[in-house]
Amino acid sequence: MKTPEQIVHVVDDDEAMRDSMSWLLEAEGYKVACYDSAGAFLAAWRSSLRGCIVLDVRMPEMSGLELQEKLDSIGSHLPIIFVTGHGDVPMAVSALQRGACDFIEKPFNDEDLLERIERALALEKEIAARQQRDHAIASRLEQLTQREREVMKLVVAGRLNKQIADELDISMKTVEAHRARVMEKMGVRTLAELVKAVMSVD
């Protein structure tokens, strides 16, 4: 369930909270990295980071919500679980509306936290797999020639070979050859697979 490269990034200015969370998560077999401020996490952030973020809403200098905004603007896809104190629920709800994955209120139950982290890591795994698939499709699309792209566009639009031949003023044989090369380069076997691949990166 947990992949080795996934790390639970705990961002909290309260040292006791960081220590207890780290101890709990490591005891459960998770890899953990702790940061004492939003700025410290931002400095360590890179697009290759995997896992999820357990983020305190209220922190000096930069709040959890401000960090969420910054991460959003630099394209981070790490799911965020906000840790909120009493009275921070409206804030947490607004964080959810802006794309946070979940929130948990202090004092929380360990099992509850672990469950939410497991869900966030499963979500991140899905996001990473989807990104990988989209990158693969995009790089296959780049291998197509201009003419192959034209043929593919018309095939995906539902045109028959004869219609494509007329529209592009080429022979049916040429259309068939281009169509076969498009399928081969895109790594698909059926028209449905081709349509799905093209639509996923549109």
Image: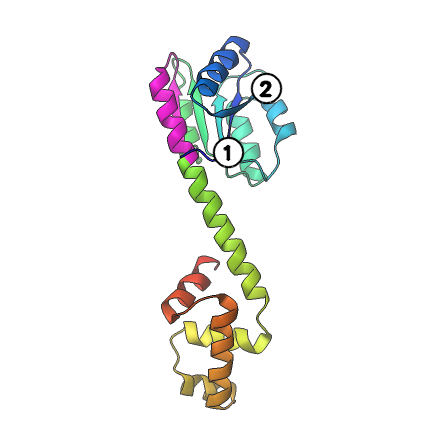
Label 2: how many Cα within 10 Å (few below 14, some 14–19, many 20+): many
Between 88 and 25, the residue placed more toward the observer is 25
Q: Residue at x 54, y 54 (%)?
A: 135
Q: Residue at x 57, y 71 (%)?
A: 144
Find the distance from the CA under tag 1 to the CA under tag 2. Answer: 25 Å
Q: Is residue 91 above or below residue 146?
A: above
Q: Earlier in the sequence, mark 1 or mark 2?
A: 1
Extent of the magenta region: 101-121
Query: Helix, strand or loop at disc 1?
Result: loop
Q: Is residue 181 within the magenta segment?
A: no
Between 169 and 17, the residue placed more toward the observer is 17
Q: Position of residue 54 (x, y in %)?
A: 47, 24
Query: Helix, strand or loop at disc 2?
Result: loop
Answer yes or no: do the residues labelled 1 and 2 have beta carbons within 8 Å? no
Q: Is residue 67 above or below residue 12?
A: below
Label 1: how many Cα within 10 Å (few below 14, some 14–19, many 20+): few
Q: Residue at x 40, y 62 (%)?
A: 196
Q: Is residue 22 above or below residue 146?
A: above
* Quadrant (top left/top right/bottom left/bottom right) for the N terminus: top left
Q: Position of residue 178 (x, y in %)?
A: 51, 80
Instruction: Count all numbered tags in the image, as a single digit.
Output: 2
| Residue 73 in view (yes/no) | yes
Q: Which residue is mark 1?
A: 4
The numbered dot on residue 165 is none
Q: Which residue is mark 2?
A: 37
| Residue 93 in view (yes/no) | no
